[in-house]
Image: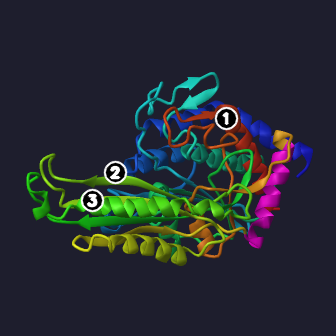
Amino acid sequence: MTSTEANRLDTLIAERAAEQVAFLAELVKVPSDNPPGDCAPHAARAADLLEGLGYEVERHQVPQAQAQAAGMVSVTNLIIRHRFGDGPVIALNAHGDVVPPGDGWSQDPYGAAVVDGEMYGRGAAVSKSDFATYAFALDALKRSGLPLKGTVELHFTYDEEIGGEVGPGWILEEKLTTPDYVISAGFSYAVVVAHNGCLHLEVEVAGKSAHAALPFTGVDALEAATGILGALYAYRATLPATVSQTTGIGSPQITVGLISGGINTNVVPDRVTFRLDRRIVPEENPEAVEAEVRKVIEDAAKAAPAARVTIRRILLARPLVPDAGSDRLTRAIQAAAAEVIGEDIPAKGVPLYTDARLYAEAGIPVVLYGAGPRTIEEANGHRADEKLRLSDLSLATRVVARTLVDLLT
């Protein structure tokens, strides 16, 4: 791409900068918390906004029973396709579901307030921002008149926060798309080429209730659960000995994030349920990790034989592993970013897990890149006062547009 062509793209993006910010604000203002996962209303609003930009939007509603089986109320995935000519199909994927806002906000989490050049709101950075990045990058290409060869697809899905199975997983399984390359939502100052996998297990410890005056007549589920939790925390202390060779990943982690149980203060608890999250580094085998964690639980449960312990898998998400096929994407993004940002950006891993892995599992090269700061902590991702520097939205849009030109010429 010549400097004249690059400047032309930059000008086209700048012309609609205010419209892009307004577009993102409208997305932030519509709640799409997951859970509970009633995301069809947000998809309807997003589709209307995208049609306002001149796109033909395909609305793909996941069957109600399938959405509910995944733990959601409603899911409608959106696909846009723009064909420039014969050539590769490049898909850009971002998710519109978000974690609930929680407490501690200084701004309305659905207000999309702009303060000192930053937009505040749940999803402003993760990853409604990349609905805007990708839509306006493609818009600039459409208006540029450049002789491109290939097709750009926009995949806007709605279940990343619970794993992606009825988002990218579903559109791939239904054969609604077969892209050659995928760029998934990320941040502006690095290309993510690898990330952790994740195991979620639910452990239920069942005992027998009894009056607190006669606790020995029951089976204390909490006492049994305490032994299992102690074993899991002892297991956690062993994990730092394993360190991924991929920069940015670190060590495996395990967290018990949810726990419930008991009947009343004066009753021996008959049931305790907890859920755990075990992060899986790229070098680990997910099935072996699950077997390892199950063994820790089962061995600890032997100390309380009167209690019944059941283990249920909620999620097994595989790591995104660095792949030679994604090198073309990485080089193209890095070259474009060096021109736009004026610095070399790294290719690295992150300790998160994302739905990008589902494209990789289907054999499609994928990396993560989009609008955002250098770290998710800086964006307050999944925390109060999530925010996005609007200058980063502009930077990422320019980088993605140039990257697409590289891949389609």
Residue 148 percent location from the top left of the image? 78, 59
The correct choice, above or below, for 55 with respect to 224 in the image is: above
Q: Secondary structure at mark 1?
A: loop
Tag 1 or tag 3, which sits nearer the N-term?
1
Q: What amino acid does circle 1 point to?
A: Arg
Residue under pointer 3: 223
Front-lying residue, 195 or 367: 195
User: Going 61% across and 36% down the picture, which residue do you hit?
Assistant: 20
- Residue 281 point in image, percent of width and height: 62, 65
Q: Is residue 409 left or right of residue 358?
A: right
Residue 30 percent coordinates (x, y): 42, 39
- Of pointers 3 and 2, the one earlier in the residue sequence: 2
Q: Amino acid at mark 2?
A: Pro
Q: Nearer the viewer, mark 2 or mark 1?
A: 2
**Which label number is shown at residue 254?**
none
**10 Å neighbourhood of mark 2: few (<14), some, or many (≥20)?**
few
Q: Which numbered disc, 2 or 1, marks the residue that appears first in the sequence?
A: 1
Residue drawn where x is 53% and y is 73% of the image: 289
The one of 149 and 404 positioned closer to us in this rendering: 404
Contact check, label 3 and label 1, Cβ < 8 Å: no
Residue, x 61% and y 43% (percent of image)? 376
Q: Which residue is mark 1?
A: 16
On screen, residue 71 versus residue 394, left or right, reads left
Secondary element type, mark 3:
helix
What type is the residue that disc 3 sits on?
Glu
Q: Which residue is mark 2?
A: 36
Q: What secondary structure prevails in the magenta region?
A: helix
- Residue range corresponding to the magenta coloring: 323-339
Q: Quadrant of the C terminus?
A: bottom right
Q: Nearer the viewer, mark 3 or mark 1?
A: 3
- Give x and y (percent) for residue 231: 43, 64
